[in-house]
Image: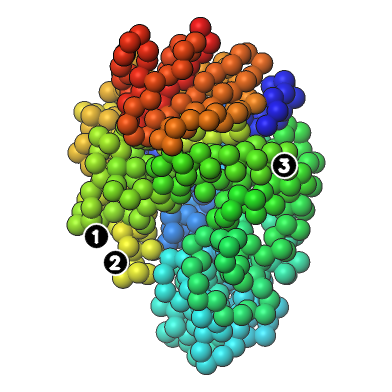
Amino acid sequence: MQAQSPNSYPWWHSAVIYQIYPRSFASTDGAIGTIAGITSKLDYLRTLGVDAIWISPFYPSPQHDAGYDVADYTDIDPRFGTLADADAMIAAAHERDIKVIIDLVPNHTSDEHRWFREALAAGPGSRARERYWFRDGTQPPTDWRSVFGGPAWTRVCDRPDAAGSPWENDQQWYLNLFDSTQPDLNWNNPQVRDYFDSILRFWLDRGVDGFRVDVAHGLVKDPALPNFSGDVSMVHGGTERPPMFDQEGVHEIFRRWNAVLSEYPGDRVLVAEAWVDPPSRLTRYVRPDEMHQAFNFTFLATPWNAIQIRETVKESLDVFGQVGRPATWVLSNHDVVRHASRLGLSVTGKGPNGIFASDEQPDAQLGLRRAKAATQLMLALPGSAYIYQGEELGLPEHTSLPDEVREDPTFFRTRGEQAGRDGCRVPLPWSADEPAYGFSPSGESWLPQPPVWRELAADQQVGRPDSTFAFYQDLLLRRKAWNLGEGDFELLDSPDHVVAGISRTDTGEYLLATCFDGTWELPSGWSVVAHSAELSKENNATVLGPDTSVWATRM
């Protein structure tokens, strides 16, 4: 990747973007986070040093899937606030030079969306049903499985609210790749395409800087609806492509959206959540006239192993560079076990779908040590990086949630076989000595917080030089000052237990090194300026221990 003047790139090319899960970020009223709560913490985020925020769904929703079941795309759920609150938040963020990206959920709506209610009322064969995937049959139309577990088809008359309704004898099936309350939209229908054009413009007119697109690889289905009994959690290039994911037709949609964003000033951005592997196939989503970024989940899912991570980094930089787009790095989000815990398990990688108290428990000390090393590695790489709320505090996964408080539909659809994602969505601790650790003025929290979070609360870390927060803050400051996100990055030959590289930018040359196990002696001529764990000296040489990263400058 060739370095350019930082002014020649759009802002998103090297931005550090902080994901906010609004239910759990900060509340100004009650047990659920609010938009005003986000506004109240913008100075905290500016102090941390992020360039942008990405906000998970805040639309009106019955909350069967924590807001990813959208009932109205052009309003705010009263639980979170109002459109006026959203306008104020966007303006306040921009005053602090923080961009705002919001979630867009185009694969499915809530079953409480007016379109789906119209479809149920209109009955089989109606034009209203053409906006979704309705099919006849005495059996499910295909053997497809839901990503959340169970079948991907629901019969109308089997819906919980069907008894005594006009459709209690309706034998048609509708497609739901996720929960049965999330019917999939039919993107072959022109009304669906026009509708989402208008949604994009509604929020662009209100000043948002871009959209993170949920399930971007899933909008178009093979119209033949062939059977497919394989794994639908990620599309792997080496196996048969699932007929419900990564179909060619998605790219036409994104080219259309790119044209909409191009009507607005300020380098607006489209970010694809596309679970597609290998990276060479993922880059098709970020061709010049389509998306601008795509989450590099292959990096997130790579086990903590130097050889494998080096190969992932090399391939990612190569293939994204071939289409002139930056790689986009991420280690945690609202859908996976927090990497401070995931990396403390005996088997690393993407990890389990949640952790029960009866499962193997992460080694907290090892997990945090590796998490800090992984983060320092990630933030040295060229491109854009995403941080999930609370990782800057070193928060681990909540692994002892009682089953009766769980809300993730994955837990229920797998009949308790998978813990689900609630453990990474627990409300943040802001003040150690307040009820709910300062999450809400009422002292309420929609999920219980683990006791260990008291010592990790923000007020225990901000301003403390030895804290995880200070570690992140220092890395973000140096990354921006050195322009690492736009560096010409060269991986170096190194032992099998080390990943090392040099970033050459318009401000100088910088060495990144991560030692995964054993020890490694830093080459002469370099001076360490940032490190994730303590270093040692041997014969006047700096030595890295296991699970340690450093950034160094020329002496």
Earlier sequence position, callout 1 versus callout 3: 3
Indicate the amino acid at tag 3.
Gln
Indicate the amino acid at tag 2.
Gly
The residue singled out by tag 1 in the image is 403
Disc 1 crowd rating (10 Å Cα; few below 14, some 14-19, many 20+) is few
The residue singled out by tag 3 in the image is 322
Q: Between residues 468 and 506, which one lies in front from this camera angle?
A: 506
The residue singled out by tag 2 in the image is 416
Q: Could you tell me if residue 84 is visible in this image?
A: no
Indicate the amino acid at tag 1.
Asp
Earlier sequence position, callout 3 versus callout 2: 3
Disc 3 crowd rating (10 Å Cα; few below 14, some 14-19, many 20+) is some
Q: Could you tell me if residue 526 is visible in this image?
A: yes
Residue 432 as seen in the image, left or right of residue 39: left
Q: Residue at x 37, y 34 (%)?
A: 516
Q: Is residue 85 above or below residue 420?
A: above
How far apart marks 2 and 1 lie (CA) works out to 8 Å
Q: Between residues 502 and 12, which one lies in front from this camera angle?
A: 502
Number of marks in the rendered image = 3
* Quarter of the rendering containing residue 288: top right
Secondary structure state at the residue bearing disc 3: helix
Q: Where is residue 220 shown, x and y percent of the image?
A: 66, 66
Q: Where is residue 113 shown, x and y percent of the image?
A: 56, 65
Which one is in front in this view, the residue at disc 2 or the one at disc 1? 2
Q: Is residue 464 above or below residue 200?
A: above
Residue 63 as seen in the image, left or right of residue 15: left
Secondary structure state at the residue bearing disc 2: loop
Q: Where is residue 463 shown, x and y percent of the image?
A: 34, 16
Q: Is residue 530 above or below residue 71?
A: above
Residue 350 as seen in the image, left or right of residue 222: left
